[in-house]
Amino acid sequence: APVPVRLAPVLVGSFGKFVAEGCSPQGDEEIESFIEALKRTITNFEAEGRRVCLLASADLAHVGPQFGDEEPVDEAQLHALEEADCASLGAACRGDAEEFYWSVASDGDARKVCGLAPIYTMLRVLEGCRGEVLRYSQWPDPVGTVTFCSMVFESANA
């Protein structure tokens, strides 16, 4: 018999304010309250014997004139993007939400990583998780390049 699946979509807003102010979202009352509520919900579901799966759907970098940059994207910039993205993804694989945040925010989010807030939030909710990059790719175009990847995480409780 098919197992019933329940979905609860959650939209995570921008961290632009934190990036602009040069501070982390950690400790912000609203952010912390939201993360704790998600953790409680997951704990309650697991206590009832339910399985929980989190899915964060988000792109990484958005660069080039289409995204407000002055110069077209060249091969050197694509290589630099990959290096920066891999540093961010390494932090995510280690389950380190703060390191992930600062790997994106330290330069004012020059890569325009739209996945900053959802990935950070998921890492905070899955405290102590470990991840693996399954595939990294770029959609290169001189007027606008987007980078993205697929990852899988295992909760520390799994």
Image (spheres, helix red, strand yellow):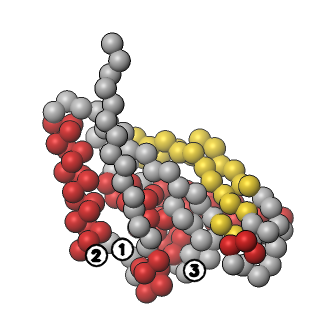
Q: Picture quarter containing residue 31?
A: bottom left
Looking at numbered disc 2 in the image, what kind of residue is underneath it?
Answer: Asp
What residue appears at the point 59 percent right and 60 percent down from the top-left corner? 60
Looking at numbered disc 1 in the image, what kind of residue is underneath it?
Answer: Pro
Residue bearing the label numbered 1: 25
- Provide residue 69's location: percent of width, then percent of height: 72, 79
Residue bearing the label numbered 3: 107
Name the residue furthest bottom: 21
- Mark 2 vs 1: CB contact within 8 A: yes
Against 32, is 129 above or below?
Answer: above
What residue appears at the point 33 percent right and 45 percent down from the top-left corner? 8
From the viewer's perspective, tell me whether residue 6 is left or right of residue 97: left
Tell me the quarter of the image containing the C terminus: top left
In three-dimensional space, the C-alpha distance between marks 2 and 1, rounded to whole angstroms, equals 6 Å
Mark 3 Cα shell of 10 Å, populated few (<14), some (14-19), many (≥20): few
Against 146, is 157 above or below?
Answer: above
Q: Nearer the viewer, mark 2 or mark 3?
A: 2
Viewer-closest of 85 and 10? 10
What residue appears at the point 50 percent right and 51 percent down from the top-left corner? 57
From the viewer's perspective, tell me whether residue 138 is left or right of residue 16: right
Residue bearing the label numbered 2: 28
- Provide residue 78's location: percent of width, then percent of height: 76, 63
What residue appears at the point 66 percent right and 58 percent down from the top-left corner? 147
Can the viewer see residue 93 in this picture? Answer: no
Local secondary structure at mark 3: loop
From the viewer's perspective, tell me whether residue 34 is left or right of residue 122: left
Local secondary structure at mark 1: loop
Can the viewer see residue 75 in this picture? Answer: yes
Mark 1 Cα shell of 10 Å, populated few (<14), some (14-19), many (≥20): some
